[in-house]
Image (cartoon, helix red, strand yellow):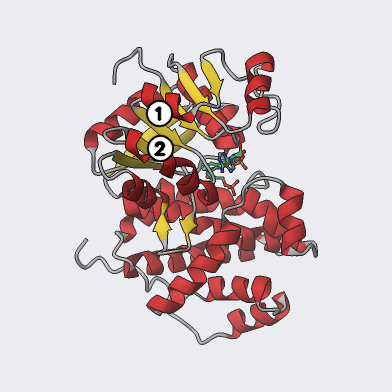
Amino acid sequence: MTRQQPIAVLGGGSFGTAIANLLAENGHHVLLWMRDPEQAESIRTLRQNPRYLKGVEILAQVEPTTDLSSTLDACELIFVALPSSALRQALQPFAAQLGGKMLVSTTKGIEADGFMLMSQILEQIAPHARIGVLSGPNLAREVAEHALTATVVASQDEALCRSVQQVLHGRTFRVYASADRFGVELGGALKNVYAIMAGMAAALGMGENTRSMLITRALAEMTRFAVKLGANPMTFLGLAGVGDLIVTCTSQKSRNFQVGYALGEGLSLDEAVSRLGEVAEGVNTIKVLKCKAEELQVYMPLVAGLHAVLFEGRTLDQIIGVLMRGEPKTDVDFISTDGF
Ligand SMILES: NC(=O)c1ccc[n+]([C@@H]2O[C@H](COP(=O)([O-])OP(=O)(O)OC[C@H]3O[C@@H](n4cnc5c(N)ncnc54)[C@H](O)[C@@H]3O)[C@@H](O)[C@H]2O)c1
Ligand SMILES: O=P(O)(O)OC[C@H](O)CO
């Protein structure tokens, strides 16, 4: 990648906007692609995103655009910050332009059909592209407001990891590298489900002991599931595993947490999602994950419990009763270091 070449960010939501600004602060010309011409025009003239990250100034080096084809042609490094529900549909028509490009997914979701992570979809659409993921405890607003933040770029393509580190590393944003793309990406997708539970617990006035139990048992479940899929459990001890789980399960800024909070206040799932008006990936992930856990016969009582409350008509009291009275278990039973 030459220094003069622009960098693309696809998706004009909270995270796309935050990443675009970080790149611009580091001196890069950024093409921020979004589908809505009015939003693009508003950014061009007001230097603010009218809908997301209100109050954050979008730097002059960030050029909003609605022309995806020209954006892909102009850039070799492309960050994808689209919702998981939109990624395939948005990029499939441009597959021929993606060969040889560095595609870095920041999207934390799972496609139901085939249980596919976003980088796997990118790989399927563009088999000749170079693929990576960026994931970690990265609340968009905090990134945009320069809270000291760390993230992980994961790919087996070391040069891609180095490129991403070079362009994003800055005064307030630190980028670690990992070769475990699957584990890093899976951690980012799974933690959203547990953040919904944490939001519910907070709304119901449950205490810090409860939150700590939830986070720790969530880590156990996530890791057990990941190991069954062949992932390296050690990745779940890093920023993209427990790091992201902590921030999303403890912050009111997390949209998944907010959905859970609204549910805890008595709103229906539909009401909670529409009150949010932004993406909360955990709502889809819970369905996909419940199916996959059953198929693989992985013990995931928290996932089963949340699914029962949201989609099977069970009450939270019933589920809490089942969880607390369940057969006693061993504490750290989910990490086998055999082979790692
Ligand atoms: N916001 C965060 O703190 C954060 C941090 C890290 C990762 N992520 C991940 O980034 C992804 C995007 O999240 P976000 O927070 O930016 O969402 P958001 O709700 O803030 O914005 C979503 C954006 O996607 C656009 N969009 C929706 N469907 C589209 C389509 N078909 N074609 C083109 N654009 C479309 C919307 O117009 C909107 O601009 C999610 O997977 C999320 O998990 C978010
Ligand atoms: O706001 P959420 O719940 O989508 O979480 C945002 C990021 O994934 C936190 O790392």
Look at 33% across and 66% down and name the residue there.
229
What is the C-alpha distance between the residues marked 1 and 2? 8 Å
Q: Does the CB distance between marks 1 and 2 fall below 8 Å?
A: yes
Categorize mark 2 by other alpha carbons within 10 Å: few (<14), some (14-19), many (20+). some
Residue 278: where, in percent of width, then height? 66, 45
Determine whether the residue tagged by mark 2 lies in a helix, strand or loop.
helix
- Name the residue type under label 2: Phe
Determine whether the residue tagged by mark 1 lies in a helix, strand or loop.
helix
Q: Quadrant of ligand 1?
A: top right
- Mark yes or no: residue 171 visible: no
In the rendered image of this protein, does residue 283 appear above or below residue 86?
Answer: below
Categorize mark 1 by other alpha carbons within 10 Å: few (<14), some (14-19), many (20+). many
Front residue (pair 335, 98):
98
Please name the residue that numbered disc 2 is placed on. Answer: 94
* 194 sits left or right of 96 in the view: right
- Mark yes or no: residue 31 visible: yes
Front residue (pair 152, 148):
152
Please name the residue that numbered disc 1 is placed on. Answer: 72
Residue 1: where, in percent of width, then height? 29, 21
In the rendered image of this protein, does residue 31 appear above or below residue 91?
Answer: above
